[in-house]
Image (cartoon, helix red, strand yellow):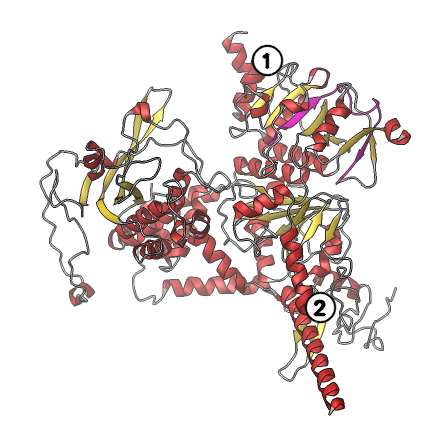
Amino acid sequence: MSAATALGEDLATYNFAYLDEQTKRMIRRAILKAIAIPGYQVPFASREMPMPYGWGTGGVQVTASILGPQDVLKVIDQGADDTTNAVSIRAFFQKVASVAVTTKTREATIIQTRHRIPEEKLQAGQVLVYQVPIPEPLRFLEPRETETRKMHALEEYGLMHVKLYEDIARHGHIATTYAYPVLVSGRYVMDPSPTPKFDNPKMDMSEALQLFGAGREKRIYAIPPHTRVVSLDFEDHPFEIQTFDEPCALCGAEGVYLDEVILDDRGGRMFVCSDTDHCEDRRAAGHRGSMSPDEAYAGHGKGEGEAAR
Amino acid sequence: MSEALLSTVAVSGGFDDPVFQAQAVFRALMDAMARPGTVHDLPVSIAPPAPLGQGSGAVALAICDPDTPVWLGEGADSESVRAWLSFQCGAPVARDADRSAFAFARGTNMPAMDAFAIGTQEYPDRSTTLVVEVEALEGGVRLRLDGPGIDGQRVVGPVGLPEDFVAQRAANRALFPRGVDVVLVAGLRMMALPRSTVVSHVNETEAG
Amino acid sequence: MYVAVKGGEAAIANAHKMLADRRRGDRSLPSITVEQLVEQLALAVDRVMAEASLYAPELAALAVKQARGDMIEAIFLLRAYRTTLPRFGASLPVETGDMVAERRVSATYKDLPGGQVLGPTFDYTHRLLDPALAGDETVAPAPARESEGEPLTRVSDILAQEDLIERAYSGDPAEMPQEPSGDLTREPMEFPMARDLRLQALARGDEGFLLALGYSTQRGYGRTHPFAGEIRIGEVEVEIDVPELGFAVSLGRIRVTECQMVNQFAGSAKLPPQFTRGYGLVFGQSERKAMAMALVDRSLRAGELGEDRVAPAQDEEFVISHADNVQATGFVEHLKLPHYVDFQAELDLVRRMRAEFEARQTRESDTQEAAE
């Protein structure tokens, strides 16, 4: 058999959602265990995917294993639907599963994400799939898997508290801004993936099921809906999230996570929603920010615009 | 049963669309695990040989394969069931309940939960998932559920569980994160009681 | 006026077109064929097969071409293909003792049954660039050595006859391990790792990484006193047991490189003084990889042999977790993906901490001034 026909025949007939059925079953079993033991990292035999490790192979395997023909998929990276990696993963699922895709948070049944949780409150029936680079929250305190596994088994999380407390001693506050550790359902300390800690409160008692896939590190973990997710802190130094001084320059939203955009080399900058769907939705509803390019509603060009209905 | 008949039984009654039906059953299972006590329909047509129930058969075909030893309890076991499972999903039959990844039993004569694998403190996932056939998922003794996946509390009333089920669950919950996850099936309907769920009698909690 | 960056899809499509264009290069030159790569860049093809864990020379050559000669990219391509292939079963252990060896050398004996066979080696070539190779000069066929038909006795077997080396599987079916060998591409990894899985990880591990680790043991970071007992390269038969037939069926022949290191060992409380083994087996012709693998395999046995684990090459979690170049390249290169959400969080923190720092300094200098 020549190389060309071997490749042509097999790759032309890949299974629905790329993974073979046995692989899907293996991943599905891991997902069920992960849901039954919230926050515990279930080892799974991660497969080589046609995209590089570290680029979302864990999330892609989880999504491929749960995805069905009825689903509507949204993929975001940094909160945006149009970043190259999000575009690439979305295109992958369109190709191998002919799945319907959307950028609208509320229309999606499955949302695969890297580094953000959508601003809009997620609903029952939605599944949020996180791409995770390093699933072990204790890894940077203890590089050995054999040791960290013991710590989780014994619920021995003193090291993490010591680390956070050292931050306070040195800086006056906890200096962790993303991948901020959480305690899930009172038992497992868990890494929320490198989302900014701004998003941590959204994980708590969420209506949606949250699944986490780490391909290179071969771990799957989960937070069922309505599950307590508490960011680690101290009585005298309670957990707090980032705040921004100004609203989104495009839609005027406050209390959302903003990206800083450099406009020129003279220090000009603006802050805009990291969640592109949320921003577009607000602008479609007539909200305006200080630098909004939208033409209508002149006179609302500065500051928070009122919704025109 | 003759070998010829056995093989006819083995090769029929499976999924007619394995890829999508397995996905549909899994999604129902996933939602059930994520929201303990909620009832889900298994949207498949399936005809496993007696005495294995339809729901148990659907779960087995969706999730079991050569990597998952299955254990068959009284009321779920027969030569035809073994042949069917072997043909349909290649799952080996485990002799010992505590060596199985999945176990299928009937609520009226299921073994005590401590007969199954509970995993280890380091690897609590290495445990048995117990699929129990009950008469009905509603209308029985009222049980209160608390825990992850439940907004406040949820009350369920499956019919046909052992009398000491709540006590068994309490012992199982005390092992957390180790423990057995339970899936209850009645016909093509299902609910899940993962190990994280605390089960109590409604009157008990009201009194206490 | 600010307009959010759009058009990721078009940008990706254009980048791929440009890649295809650069890959083809100057159109006035003929496109290189897969057959040419298999024949003339055979060692590159071998490396791709070895580290992709798939013995398929034509597919490996295609991967090399598609990757524009980037070896790790080619390995990645072939692995992503391999993962979609169904598993029909496990072959019987290959019998390297029956190998039709093209090369076989031992550093531990001057001469031995079957002799030293140099084969197609770069050893003893003078590394002078050869202008003749720039053209298409006719190359005379190599003189073929008369095969004696006798299998070449393995050096380790010679030592075993005297009981001077630890015993490994002898070839006696009664001693065959009953547990099927593990497969780390199908099961989750777990530490500590059984030796079969460890050897699999090393066999598909990055050549450069293993070379550096092996080298480090020679320079004193976990010294193992190795001798190259034997290196052999040649074809072996791959057979699979077919229960329905009751006998093994040959699937064909593959070329492999095997290295058995013989290491001095002073003995421990449990074990008598004897030589121990480090083992390397690699698809294709790759002596460097097989030797490095054997050195690292022996180093990783430190715990089992009661030696102190003090050096990187003796640290199983460290070595195995970082040996896979497809994983490593993915994670290193993922740093070029956008991280601006997290960077924003860090920016905010640094700005805040700077403001606090400056406020503190101002306060301190005010206090100082007041004191003066």
* In the image, residue B146 lies in the stretch drawn in magenta: yes
The CA distance from mark 1 to mark 2 is 68 Å
Q: Quadrant of the N terminus of chain C?
A: bottom right
> Dot 1 falls on which chain?
B
* In the image, residue C243 lies in the stretch drawn in magenta: no
Residue at the top extreme of this rendering = B1
Q: Quadrant of the C terminus of chain C?
A: bottom right
Contact, CB < 8 Å: mark 1 with mark 2?
Answer: no
Q: Nearer the viewer, residue C49 or A108?
A: C49
Q: Seen in the image, is C96 located left or right of residue B97?
A: left
Residue at screen point 72% across, 80% down: C359
Residue at the right extreme of this rendering = B207
Residue at screen point 42% across, 43% down: C82
Residue behind mark 2 = A172
Q: Tag 1: residue type?
A: Ser
Q: Position of residue C56 (x, y in %)?
A: 34, 44
Q: Tag 2: residue type?
A: Gly
Residue at screen point 66% across, 37% down: B177
Residue A280 to residue C181: above or below: below
Q: Which range of residues does the magenta coloring cover?
A: B127-147
Q: Position of residue C370 (x, y in %)?
A: 76, 90
Residue at screen point 48% across, 38% down: C186
Q: Nearer the viewer, residue B44 or B102?
A: B102
> Dot 2 falls on which chain?
A
Q: Position of residue C127 (x, y in %)?
A: 19, 64
Q: Nearer the viewer, residue A57 or C27?
A: A57
Q: Nearer the viewer, residue C367 or C242?
A: C367
Which disc, if any, is residue B78?
A: 1
Residue C151 to residue C198: above or below: above
Determine if residue B124 is in view: yes
Determine if residue A179 is in view: no
Residue A76 to residue A260: above or below: above
